[in-house]
Image (spheres, helix red, strand yellow):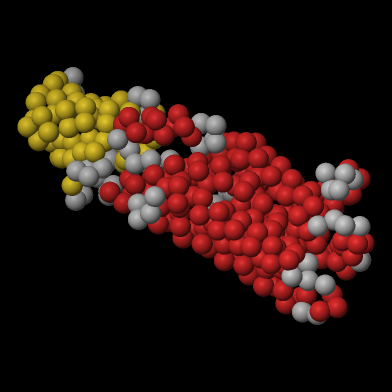
Amino acid sequence: MISGSPTLFRYIFGRFLAGFTAVMCVLMGVVYLFTIIDLMRRAATHENVPFRTLLAIGGLQMPEMAQIMLPFGVLFAAIFTCWRLNKTNELIVIRAAGVSVWQFLTPMLAGAILVGVFSTTVVNPVSSTLLAKYNQMLSLYLQQNSNLVTVSRTGIWLRQPTKDGYALIHSESFDEKAWRLADVMVFFFDNADNFTARIDAPEAFLKDGYWEIHDALVNEHNASNHEAIRRLPTELTSQKIEESFADPDTISFWSIPDYIYIMEETGVPTTPLHIHFQALLAQPFLFMAMILLAATFSLRPPRFGGTGAMIVLGVGVGFFIFFMESMLHAFGISQKIPVYLAAWTPAAVSLLLGTTALLHMEDG
């Protein structure tokens, strides 16, 4: 508690959460508006897409967008709360009562931890479910390609169009370096979803414009025959397949460890999932860092002037951290830096910067 005062703790905690709620409502309102405008633009080339359907599609994406906006919501709410306490001279009274900067920041730090834990354990699972539905509706109404690859306990499944319908390719394991599928089964269907043929083979390699299937047992037209090499035309490329592996954002926080295990068993790269999982664990600490940085830039006494410029600078630092986080995640995914360094550096560096600046302010 703040100097043994639960009343003051509840007051600052409530002010922070109220400011956070207001900021997030404004941010999500703006994001939703631009999302609907973008969906309307894309729907202009498709007939018979009702406006209420676009509203529903946009709504399904909002939990995911909320997760992206949360660091800014925490930062802006902390800046607003500190600025209000400063402007109304409440901060002067609090400090005169012997309350240190660390003590009156405790309620906001507690709020940041609460928001971070809630986001990771509740919002993320809900968001992953709704985002998967969002992708399905985009594919259904706006003909946007959905993931070509599905990874499950039974192995890897790929779907690709063929001349008369589509083919489903199943493999027990996957070698990314050689682009080799092992223990391959290919099922062919026509446009009416009727089964037409099947190929079984010990391995298949992705070449430029086709699958090269070795020692293929072909079953079609009620007859079977062996082919040393069977070529299956495809528009898939290594880049398309890599991009089609399940988006980490569509996997619940609670399911990620199991999903990583399944992907490792089938030979699918798991680095993006590892980084995503560690970033979710680091989220409460990143939000705490936002509180410390906000205090650094918004607790300047009004008599010194320049408060507005300091607040703008604080917002700029928040955006810099966001871009730094995105950049480090990209480096981690490309395996240029370790997973833990990519996921935890933004939170760790921000916490150190905020703590150092506040220590300097408090001592000064």
Q: Residue at x 21, y 27 (%)?
A: 183
218 is higher (above) or lower (below) than 46: above
205 is higher (above) or lower (below) than 198: below
Can you give x and y, in whole percent of width and height, for residue 231 in the image?
15, 40
Residue 180 visible at all: yes
Instruction: Give the residue furthest to the top.
Output: 222
Q: Quadrant of residue 194?
A: top left
Q: Which residue is drawn at 71% across and 42% down?
A: 114
Can you give x and y, in whole percent of width and height, for residue 22 in the image?
79, 55
Q: In which quarter of the image is residue 185?
A: top left
Can you give x and y, in whole percent of width and height, for residue 252 in the image?
54, 35
Quarter the N terminus occupies: top right
Q: Is 146 situated left or right of 170 in this image?
A: right
Front residue (pair 154, 21): 21
Instruction: Give the residue furthest to the left.
Output: 228
Q: Residue at x 89, y 65 (%)?
A: 92
Can you give x and y, in whole percent of width and height, for residue 280 in the image?
56, 43
Front residue (pair 259, 352): 352
Instruction: Give the residue furthest to the bottom.
Output: 305
Quarter the C terminus occupies: bottom right
Residue 26 visible at all: no
Q: Which residue is drawn at 88% across and 44% down?
A: 4
Front residue (pair 98, 196): 98
Figure disc tally: 0
Q: Is 317 situated left or right of 270 in this image?
A: right
